Image: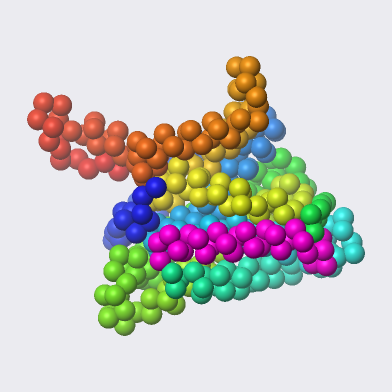
Amino acid sequence: MADATSINTLPAQPGNWFDRVPPAYWVLGLVLLVAPAFVSPFILGEVFSRALILGMIALSLMFLGGYGGMVSLAQMAFAGFAGYMVAVFGSSAVVEISQGWPWWLVIPLALILTVIFSVAIGWLAVRTEGIYTIMITLAIAAAFFYFTRQNYDIFNGFQGFNSVEPPRLFGVDWRGNYAFYFLTLFWAVVCYAVVLYVSQAPFGLALQGVRDNPRRMAALGYNVTAHRVAAYAFAGVIAGLGGILSTWQLSQISPGTVSIGAAIDILVIAVVGGLRHPIGAFIGAFVFVLLETFAKDFLITLGMAGERFQLVIGLGFLLIVFFSPDGLLGLWDKFKASRNRDPLTGEDKGERPL
């Protein structure tokens, strides 16, 4: 896996960022809007909605890694923490613990507490670099997993919470596949647009400067630690939104949701898609969910044990990283660059790939 600090992110450009959205993204948006008319409810819920949710959580990792140079394995812990807070303060089948507060109070409270949690973790993690940051965030993710599994007073131990459902709002049953898909799509687009905006805002540009040369940024008067901790807070909001949506989709949350395997899955998704651009998080999530959903059936068709589907996911991950450390986006750029190169001289024709 490539060092996050060496990843080239999109440079700042003048003008309205909205006008710089490639035409292919508008086509993709149109496809996502009309997808419910062409796919089954199962595919809509288990593939599209799940990919968007995992993409949001991976997007929080992409923001930290791509723009901040900090690879964190605690993003699933942030998402799970928000999901647990919704279950604890909201309604669930575990009436002995759940408080049953209204949604308009529960959701902001869950996100605020998630930000506090992510700031506390970020305050510890930013004092390390490289492999040490990965290890400390992995240790935090593991500690949170075992804490939720062993604590019964707040997190209900191994069983967790079930019947955690989205509120009925505007007369719409958001538990339905179609309604929930559009709810998820809306927040995924919002998170993507906000990350794009922040990346070109003064804070995002300063964060990229801290990523590239922290000593120089400190000499210019920027508080390096504060920028990095603020990046964790911002990423915590995105991961928290994904965690709430995931809890609503599954109608439950348990320690398995925040397991070590789930934390590593988010890293795989972000790396497969490409850490250099926000859209990579959703591309990686879509590929991951497709493999997760259909690899088992494919192996059974070949007469192999279905439990080996993780092997298929692992091999796919290794192949993508081997041929392109920048993930699928890197492969796409290499393909466009090859088409832009003169086959006789090998020189660039002068048109830069998007």
**Residue 50: quadrant of the picture:** top right
User: In the image as oriented, which residue stretches furthest toward the bottom?
Assistant: 221
Does 260 sit left or right of 269 as displayed?
A: right
Q: Which residues are magenta?
A: 129-156
Foreground residue among 89 and 351: 89
Left or right side of 19 for 166: right
Q: Is residue 217 above or below residue 13?
A: below
- Which residue is located at x 63 percent, y 32 percent? 293
Q: Is residue 112 visible?
A: yes
Q: What residue lies at 61% left-to-right and 70% top-to-bottom? A: 117
**Where 177 falls versus 66 (above or below)?**
above
Along the viewing direction, whichever of 251 and 192 lies nearer the viewer: 251
Residue 282 picture location, percent across and down = 50, 45
Residue 155 placement (x, y as % from top left):
78, 62
Q: Quadrant of residue 228?
A: bottom left
Q: Position of residue 336 (x, y in %)?
A: 28, 35
Horizontally, residue 175 falls left or right of residue 319, namely right
Quadrant containing the C terminus is: top left
Residues 323 and 330: in front is: 323
